[in-house]
Amino acid sequence: MNLKHVVTMFLALGILVLLVQSWREASSLDPEEHERLTTAITRAKQIDATLDRLVLETRTGTLGRHDELIATLRAGEDAIRDLSGEFAPTSQLRRELNHGIKRSVALWREKSDRIEEFKTANAALGNSLRYFPQALEHYLNHPSESDDPEAMRAALDAVRTTFHHEDRDRAEVLERLAAIDPGRTAKTPPGNILLIRAQKLAEETRRTEARMKDVTAVPVIKALDDVERLAQTSFRASAAKAFGHRLGLTVMATLLFIYGFLSVLNLRLTTRELNDANEMLEIDRMAQENEIERLREELGALRDRVERSGRVHLDDATAELVELADRAGHDLDEPVRELVSCAAALCRNGELEAETAANFRGLAESAARVRDAMRLMREVERTFSSEAPTGPVDLATTLAEVTGAMATRLELAGASLSPPEESGAVLGHPVLLAETLRTILGAGLAGDAPRIGIVLREEGEVTEIDVLAATLGPGCGHLPVELLRDAAEALGGAIGIEPGQVTLILSRAAVGACSPRPTAV
Amino acid sequence: MPRDRRRTPPRSPAGGSWSLAIALATVGVVGTFLALAAVPGLVAREIDAGRSGPNAAASAAVPGTIAVEPVSFRDVEIGRSLFHDRRLSADGSVSCASCHRLESHGVDGRELAIGVGGRVGSFNTPSLYNLEHSHRFGWKGEARAIEDLIDGAVEDADMLATNWARVERLVGEDATLRVELERRYGAADRSAVRRALADFIRRLRTPGAPYDAWLGGEASALDDAARRGEALFDDLGCNACHQGTGFGGTVRQSLGVMDDVYLALAPEGAGRSPIADRWPGLGALRVPPLRNVAATGPWFHDGSVASLSEAVRLMARHQLGIEPSETEIRDLVAFLESLTGRLPSEVTGR
């Protein structure tokens, strides 16, 4: 990750944060919440007005039962509950709005409590109004001279102001009535009862009117108006702010869209370039393959030329070898045979000194080895000059034939032979193989090599034999090493000459390839 | 023709990757769509908000008599279960139903309620039936809603004497209760418990009172005494406080509001005393609803009056300032007895 990637990553992160923040700001406006608030305010205002009307009707006796008043109060409680949700104080206007709502709720509760007090006072007033006429009637039916005229006049004034709505200063009348001590002034029960009832009426009237004023004095509607105004102002401000953020978001989103579109377009172009590059690489690869094929063909042709050249040289060498063998076979065989016969005859006569006889015996043996070599050469010559095709030659059979023919010599020499545990077939000429084996066995018997082996090895284990070194090896100076090597190579193998060991090494692959079954010798 | 094998590696847009480019393009498309879709809607909403006026008139329905349809607790079973759950009390000894016996019209018949650990409370057990026709709740009228009443009962040392934290813990440990509350009320907290109990209590109604049948046009539902008592109830002014569908529960009043009248009527040396002196400092009480009043004795806030006739007499003296005759009292009692409704069949098992 290089600096460019880091910058790009931070740039993308910054854009994302900016988008989220803008979206959050743009979403801060909640029209449903505003509608809920304005609806609750409107409902609360209507209920408040209805309550004022019902309180007035209750006071005047128009509303006989509290059921409607109670139902309206309950509806008001519901409206206030809807109103009392608090807004997140994200601005000064919101804080003022929350404050206004709290104040409205508190005023509503205060008004509700005052209505309770009004109802309590009004209930008592209702009974005072109910029993005052009875007391008055009782008093009129049972007048007494001991009654205080002033008190009775005050009671009658109360009657007029209360029931006949006369144009008097009601408060003054009630105050005057309340100042009378019934226990002191009224000596008889009717007057006493009238005064008590009148004073009760006056007291409850004053209290009820005061409670009613308390109810209507609670400025719930004003508080609700303030909340409504604040709500509208706050909503408009929020709407303007949200509109700005959404506009900004729109612009930003549009720019991002254009950028993204161009990026995708650029990617499409880049993809096309990549495809072109891939196509060119494919062409290059095919050209290189063609070049390799051409070079391979040239190499094959070169190899053929080398092989042809080698075959010509081989044919020349073979011709020379054939000629040498032919000459040796025809020109040297007879002198050597005579030499051997002569040496043997001289030895048999016994007239020679021991040292001379030993020399003759050595000469006879050397001559015999020369004859062996000559015989091998003839066989080689016969083999290479033969037109007969080479084929699978059973190794075990050939070895058995050779060892059978040399059984006496092997026994006399006390040589040990390690025949292969499993027989197989080797691709070659049967005569060549037999002669090779005979030569090796003969050389082994005549020399110092105590062991003669025939082994199969893996292809890679057939090592090159240093012919000169092998020739000079102990007990091997008499071997026709080069001939043996040529014969072994013709059989697909080699010879191994080590101190005390002469081995015909045949390739396991060569034997196995021409064998009807995989064998190991 | 030799080719230039050294090619510039493919260049990704703005050094970023496919994913970044596609993400930005997607954000751009979605953002543009949302923004373009939202702005007209916003403007429309603002216009609507400006135009919107009052769309709901104040509800001012007048309640009638006690609803006559059969009461079913099918959808408030969770509240009913909580109502009878003794684990809600501090020591597991009492439940709401221990005092508010539903089969006894919501009262226990004792003078004073007995709460946790046999602790005797300060007030007689009020009935919880027909509370939908009351305005304030509790003897003092201190509760604005039934939920407030439940709050008081849970934490009052004379009642359940527990606290909401403990109740919430209890609910949390009861998987069935918790699941049921969450299913019905979306949570298993104190608010849900309060609402469940309140919903159940609101469902407690005793329809089918003879008075309701008489109001419905069944003339024979009330006998002569009850009809006279009904007329007296209005004439004497009992309905100044005991009014509305519930015959009370809508106003608070002081005991002995007409004590001064009563004393003025008393003959000298009679030795009578104001009833307010019996409970100094008591203050105003919620006027109790008279629905089922004949079945919910003993009467008064402290259960100190064992006879309904005596209760009527005391009320007439001290609240109206009159001394009714024995006949009037019998008629009033007959009328009050006609306010007794039927208990829900799920309570009585019938």
Image (cartoon, coloured by chain):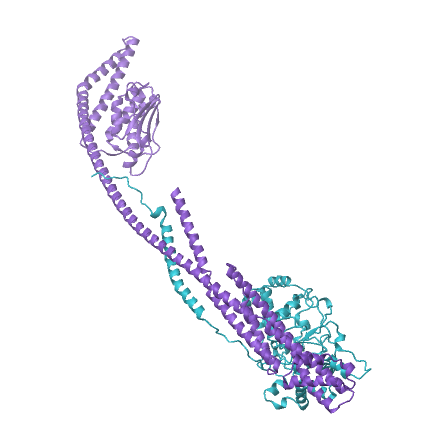
Which quadrant holds residue A204?
Answer: bottom right
Residue A1 is left or right of residue B90, and the answer is left
Q: Nearer the viewer, residue A197 or A70?
A: A197
How far from the left and from the top, in percent, is residue B34? 39, 60
Residue A433 is left or right of residue A194, and the answer is left
**Location of residue A424 with respect to A162 vertically, above or below:** above
Q: Which chain is purple?
A: A
Which quadrant holds residue A423?
Answer: top left
Q: Nearer the viewer, residue A175 or A24?
A: A175
How far from the left and from the top, in percent, is residue A333? 20, 19
How far from the left and from the top, in percent, is residue B321? 72, 82
Q: Quadrant of the N terminus of chain B?
A: top left
Residue drawn at 56 percent across, 70 percent down: A220
Q: Is residue A136 among what the camera can see?
A: yes
Q: Quadrant of the C terminus of chain B?
A: bottom right
**Location of residue A213 with respect to B188 vertically, above or below:** below
Residue A152 is left or right of residue A336, and the answer is right
Q: Nearer the viewer, residue A188 or B318?
A: A188
Q: Which chain is cyan?
A: B
Residue drawn at 71 percent across, 89 percent down: A137
Residue drawn at 36 percent across, 54 percent down: A255
Residue A475 is left or right of residue A93, and the answer is left
How far from the left and from the top, in percent, is residue B42? 42, 64
**Location of residue A128 with respect to A314 vertically, above or below:** below
